[in-house]
Amino acid sequence: MISAKEQQSMIMMTLSLPGTHESYFHFSISTAAYDDLTISDNYRWVTQDRISYLPATQYLGPGLTTISLKGVIYTELNKDSYFLLDRLRNLASKGKPFVLTSGIGKLHGLYLVESITDQQNVFFSDGLPRKISFTINLKQFGGEVCQQSTTQIQKKREQLAQPKNGKSSK
């Protein structure tokens, strides 16, 4: 049997709705482990055509980051894991951004679920798949609201990490 502390240490990444404790999704060894993580950063440029000259380009700033998670769920290990992607689809259908946190506590900011794709194969006799391969695409939720929310969350985490006597350990 795995202790709560050991189970917590196996969390790879968490999506949670800001301000709630109930609406979250853990990517972990015991639930939906991803084995491929792709992060794409974009940079925005605009091009303006000019007569008799090459087009002029101007840098507008960073674009939105996208994250792709690919992994496999083996339902033999936990039959309830068959419903994990349905749970994530239900959370994503609320149309709200999630706070994305890595397993080591790094706050990535607000992200929305852009798409969920799964492929089921190797079936039990009752039709339940033994293996579910998935791809989940996340897109950064931009704007000032994002900056304010993630900054406030990070400050709160830092306050909680401070010793109770008010002295810093630095």
Image: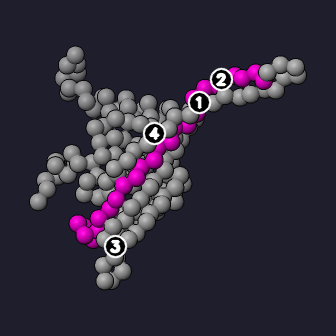
Magenta span includes 31: no
Q: In terms of secondary structure, where does tag 3 sit? A: strand
Q: Residues within 10 Å of mark 2 (few under 14, many from 20)?
A: few
Prevailing secondary structure class for the magenta stretch in the rendered image:
strand
Rounded to the nearest whole Å, what is the CA distance between mark 3 and mark 4? Answer: 30 Å
Counting residues from the start of the chain, the first of labels 2 and 3 encountered is: 2
* Residue drawn where x is 44% and y is 63% of the image: 118
Quadrant that contains the C terminus: top left
Looking at the image, which is closer to me, 21 or 65?
A: 65
Q: Callout 1, which amino acid?
A: Tyr
Q: Which mark is residue 1?
A: none
Q: Which mark is residue 39?
A: 4
Task: Give the residue pinned by disc 2.
Answer: 59
Q: In terms of secondary structure, where does tag 1 sit? A: strand
Q: Callout 2, which amino acid?
A: Tyr
In the image, residue 128 above or below residue 42:
below
* Residue drawn where x is 16% and y is 48% of the image: 5
Q: Are marks 2 and 1 in contact (CB under 8 Å)?
A: yes
Q: In terms of secondary structure, where does tag 4 sit? A: strand
Q: Are marks 3 and 4 in contact (CB under 8 Å)?
A: no
Task: Give the residue pinned by disc 1.
Answer: 43
Q: Residues within 10 Å of mark 3 (few under 14, many from 20)?
A: few
Nearest to viewer (mark 3 / mark 1): 3
Counting residues from the start of the chain, the first of labels 3 and 4 encountered is: 4
Rounded to the nearest whole Å, what is the CA distance between mark 2 and mark 3? Answer: 49 Å
